Amino acid sequence: MSDDPRALLEASDLQSLQDAALSFSDTCREVIKAAASRGVDVHVKPDQSLVTNADIAAERAFRERVEQDFPGMGVLGEEFGHTRADSAWQWVIDPVDGTADFAHGLPIWGSIIGLFFHGEPVAGVIDHPDLDMRVHAAFGLGAYRNGERLSLSDFDPALDHGKARIGIPSRSNFVKRSADGAVFDALASAYPDFRVFRSCLTHTYAATGQLDAALEWDVNLWDLAATQIVIEEAGGRYLRLRERMHPGTGMLYCAVFGRPALADRISALLAAQAGGPEAS
Amino acid sequence: MSDDPRALLEASDLQSLQDAALSFSDTCREVIKAAASRGVDVHVKPDQSLVTNADIAAERAFRERVEQDFPGMGVLGEEFGHTRADSAWQWVIDPVDGTADFAHGLPIWGSIIGLFFHGEPVAGVIDHPDLDMRVHAAFGLGAYRNGERLSLSDFDPALDHGKARIGIPSRSNFVKRSADGAVFDALASAYPDFRVFRSCLTHTYAATGQLDAALEWDVNLWDLAATQIVIEEAGGRYLRLRERMHPGTGMLYCAVFGRPALADRISALLAAQAGGPEAS
């Protein structure tokens, strides 16, 4: 553990950083709700993804708060790029993850904030304002859902695949920037009892145990900004499956997370899959 | 239209029946919330599906109300079978559709009530208590979401498949009682921007236009009890894809519904699919 830079951090500092992350999340929730109540304005970005006035207002408010409270720290966000990329401390935000559903009034979107120290996750918050649900965690301080401590039990390896409740991306994620359609098909066949929310709501449920595991495929760093710390502090396993540079988009990440034995099994299935992460 | 038995019904009677359906839905919501607040007790049924104390209490309360208000009418429910199956009037209920998610605390389940006259849908309610959202409709009286009239626009046939937001079942539905895995795979490939909620929440969103269409596969009559009337009264199209008797389960239904041109296209895709409804 001595080469984990987070071992250098004091518990009291971690507590303050977690409190800051929660307070920033409160700010985002307020700004998004206020913007939504005035009417959501949707724009299509060059990559065909959507952005709204709420995304932009929330990320701007978040950046102002970081600037005020932690002026030396970097910020990476979906809407306004990377500032102070050379800092040891990096805040990462996706103000509205699941923008299409947010714009359509489905309550399954989330607001993500993560803090990294020398690349390792230190604190994270995933907020679901329309469901009045929030999970958060900080290194060594545990993970919580609406203030209640989370503790994941393991998946019973004796259970067959069909018993696992997993959250997966839609097939879009596997074919938009890769030719990984066969990976989706293998996963859907092996674990047929899945939900697809197209947002970080599956991450939240993997942390609370309401789903047994979840998977992301070819997403940006900000989509996973809070996931590893929340899952690990809840007692779950977070496995990186693939990281690669995509021209014109940037780094794309694949990961699986949830109850440890199940995350391991899904990772093994994907590694064995022709056309899977090892092969691409 | 003269051979539609519903043409015999008076508007004032339809209004009363719709009001009764809404009142029955209120009763179910209250009973389920009360049961849930005392703690959800889950049992696995012989077919491996789940039932809880809330399902049972709600269906019982519903049956009592029908018995009191409409003593001659039949009732078909998931938990207590079929009473007065020979009546021209049949109430159909699935008190908790999405029981597994209800038991796990996900808010995406729904409570379904439908009324049929000589087999034709007359009134329907889909209630989502945890999302505080309800759609309802009655023949000729329109469809509503939380009291607001629904009116679906059509899907632009010039848009490609990738632009359609659809709700589909998980792959479980296609392989549990059929060998239709290839149908799921074809659908997921053709319409990659899908959500999977494993409940009637996709029906609700297909009626409101928050999804463009939705599909069900190998479900029971009660799972679709309110869907046709709500979709059609919202201006959408409801297409039956397959109805067949499954030994030990009963009749199983496949249907697609939503914006008319899109329901047509999905139906055509599935008809063309080897192993699809036409071939099975």
Image (cartoon, coloured by chain):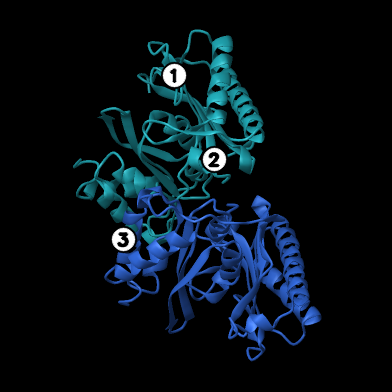
Chain colours: A blue, B cyan
Q: Do tags 3 and 1 sit on the same chain?
A: no
Residue B276 in the figure: left or right of residue A76: left
Foreground of the two, B250 or B138: B250
- Output the chain of dot 2: B
Quarter containing the C terminus of chain B: top left
Q: Chain of mark 3?
A: A
Disc 3 to disc 1, how far (Cα)? 49 Å
Quarter holding residue B179: top left
Question: Which residue shows up at 32% across the image and 32% down it?
Answer: B252
| Circle nearer the viewer, 2 or 3 | 2
Residue type highlighted by circle 3:
Ala
| Residue under pointer 3 | A186
Q: Position of residue B236 (x, y in %)?
A: 45, 40
Chain ID of residue with mark 1: B
Q: Residue at x 59, y 68 (%)?
A: A51
**Closer mark to the observer between disc 3 and disc 1:** 3
Q: For label 2, count other residues whose C-alpha is less than 10 Å away and answer few (under 14), some (14-19) or many (20+).
A: many
Instruction: State the SS at label 1.
Output: helix
Residue wearing tag 1: B7
> Disc 1 residue type?
Ala
